[in-house]
Image (spheres, coloured by chain):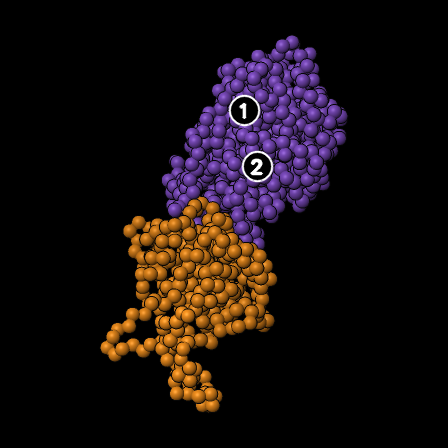
Chain colours: A orange, B purple
Amino acid sequence: MTTRSGPVADLLARRPTKLLGRSVAGRRAKRGITGIARSTRFPVRAASAPKDIEVRRPPKRTGTNFPTDWARTVPARVARVTIIETLMRPAIAALARPERTNADRLGDVDGPIIFVANHHSHVDTPLLLTSIPLPWRHEITVGAASDYFFGTMVTGALSALAIGAIPIERSKIGRGSADLAAGLITDGWSLLIYPEGGRSKDGWGQPFRGGAAYLSLRCDVPIVPVYVSGTGHILRKGSARPHPSNTVVNFGRPIWPDPGEKSRRYNERIEVAVAELGDEAGSNWWEAKRRRYSGETPGLGGPSVGSWRRAWALGDRSARRARTRRWPEI
Amino acid sequence: MARKSDERPTPRPGLVLDVDRSTPPILFHHGEGFRLEKLPAGRSRVIYPHEPLPGVADVESTISHALDNPIGSEPLSALLFAGMKLTIAFDDISLPLPPMRAPDIRQRVIEAVLDRAAAAGVDDVHIIAALALHRRMTEAELRHAVGDRVYDAFAPAGTLYNHDAEDPEAMTSLGTTGHGEDVVISRRAAESDLVVYVNINLVAMDGGWKSTATGLSSYQALRHHHNVETMKHSKSFMDQEASELHRSNWRQGDVIKRSGPTIFQIETTVNNNTFGHDGPLAMLQKREWEWTARDRAMFMGMQTGLKAMTARARRAVFHSWRAPYGVTGVHAGEVEAVHEITTENVYKQHLVPVEGQTDILTMGLPYLCPYNVNSIMNPILVMVQGLGYFFNLYRGKPLVREGGVLIMSHPTTREFHPVHHPSYIDFFEQVLADTTDPVEIEQKYEKQFAEDEWYRHLYRTSYAYHGVHPFYMWYWGSHAMDHLGGVIVVGGDPATVRRLGFRPASTLQDALEMATDVVGPQPTVTHIHNPPILMADVT
């Protein structure tokens, strides 16, 4: 007869009462699950760290550490194309009724592009992924907030698969995100990024952060500014239920950094370019052009006034395109 | 990264191929179809066009450079100022052929001009499709030419529109030339501080003073050079040195220069990349012996497919083609100085040296000429395409000797577009039934058609060519009619071909046989392998 030995055999040889310490079945019910958990011992429960010993934990697999390489393999790309073309496209057509304008401005560009867009809503990304022209549409990654989209393994995996998201650190400065994005651009991937760092809180834009400008300078690729409007009406920040509305996606002319241009100045130009596209979408190309040269292009950030007046002004701005009067003429 | 570049092998110059027994059948365009024809060995030759010259790598920068460093003029920005009247005129739907794949070069240039106008604070801008007596452009056609951005900014305000040569309020006279030719142009253009003309120079006859003196003009001025006498003395009208049409336009240009507005001419040239290097029609711009297995399969598939389609469907397919031209040059500034460079650019792409004339000239006519874009190539347009344009694509002397025969291949059906070509129908039924002599037609019928109120109304409010336009088409062929001993149409509808004054033939072999009645036995044959466009430099 063979005798079992080792920690597993020892564990099995113990009586159940020993395994659970001093407890007995009657007490177990009274103490509840928390009590049971507390009463378990190593190795069922993790061993407590000895005092004064620095514990080395394995790095988290969420946030900026979320691995996304697998989402750029051929099977994942095929799955993503299928999702975009068969699910997102009809959904966006029904929900956002997009008017896509000026994609011809990309006609002279070859190779990867950094698409830079203003950001109102979670609808922006599917809208843009169905609007960006080929060949960039299916060779693109999306810069997504690591703390939001990659907070758990499940949301991270879904984001990476469905929209080709890569984690971007937005709350602190770190090289990891920049290196990842730069590496992908060098490998020929385009990037969609929202330099405002998050969705608009009140319908107006936020100041642009410098990441896109930095990447464009570092990788020597053009930036294509894109202005998106109307998505805030569909699913604004804080809203859970989408409301169908019309949207506009207006592509701008590719921008290259001027020789010797610094990242900060370049970033300002990019923000102005998106603002001009917004002006163009709200009026027309010629009027926007004239305002640009007379220095009267309205900024993305809206007027520096009280919140209700900002909301009021926002109404005027969105109504401009519809060319409908909100009040009767007296 | 970066901007697209045209990386292709160095283009080969045009070629004159002597046909022998080993020469494969040669491609003939045949309306909305094609024929492969064997030419007689030992006495035939085929002229192939130049391969497409490389386009400029960065079109935007080329445009900017042209506007900021013009020839014989101050930079465009220096001519623009707040409070001025600016008129931008551009070539109409008849150029280029086939239409250009978006974005059209006119759009790019006009946007660059408007960008500078906006920077200078110019408010009063009008944009005019300079179509002379051609039909008005539809919204879709205007959008294609100038782009959605420009269209949406100007058309709703009524400041982007088609030229109307029959609006007496909108036209003004600038005087007459030393030869008594009236000079009449658009009043808006005449009263502008600056007219920027945006042209596409597809062939050597385009551009220069023809742009403003013709494009923005009216019947009153055009009749001085769109007539039989001028055409007979334009040998050819593609060769500026030998063209009376050119000289007349230049005389009118002198008057505009003296009494009219300042003109800032922007001329653009495109290459011969008509059917693309890799697309489904790529074989049409290759030499037959270089057709790959894919090309041959595509061609056979296309032939089979086309035969199974209705004429309407075939037309729809062909007219949807947008050529992927490369832009070979953009030059701006003073009209004549700019045009000299543009013409050189055009010649560089089109001129093929050819030695000696031929007894019989053969040509396959394609589905398209300048006057049937998105329309039907009616019998009169077949005539003008063959005897007007293709015959005149020479410098020096015609490819075919005097008294020689022209054989052209086209279905030549009795079909007309009732909206675009109403006066053509009457011209065919009434005028050609009486006579095909251009001089007699001019004297007897031109005035009646030119001043017909119904045609005038259709020209102004519908999408019809002007009443006099079919006459101009007929005059366009008068030099060829004078020069040739006969014209035979292969594969054309016999009754229609006879109405044009030509002889019908079922096959090319029949046509060659019939031609010997005129030019004698064992004639020499030259086939012009066009399009893509070539111009024979005959010595």
Which quadrant is the C terminus of chain A positioned in? bottom right
Residue found at x 48% / y 71% = A237
- Residue B427 lies, in percent from the top left, at 72, 31
Q: Amino acid at mark 2?
A: Pro
Mark 1 highlights which residue?
B289
In the displayed orientation, state which residue is furthest to the front.
A1
Quarter of the image for residue A289 reads bottom left
In the displayed structure, would residue B226 be above or below residue A5? above
- Residue B201 lies, in percent from the top left, at 50, 34
* Chain ID at mark 1: B
In the displayed structure, would residue B128 be above or below residue A37? above
Mark 2 highlights which residue?
B280
Have a look at marks 1 and 2 and say if they share a chain. Answer: yes
Viewer-side residue, A101 vs B428: A101
Q: Is residue B404 left or right of residue A265?
A: right
Lower position in the chain sequence, tag 1 or tag 2: 2
Q: Is residue B391 visible?
A: no
Quarter of the image for residue B411 reads top right
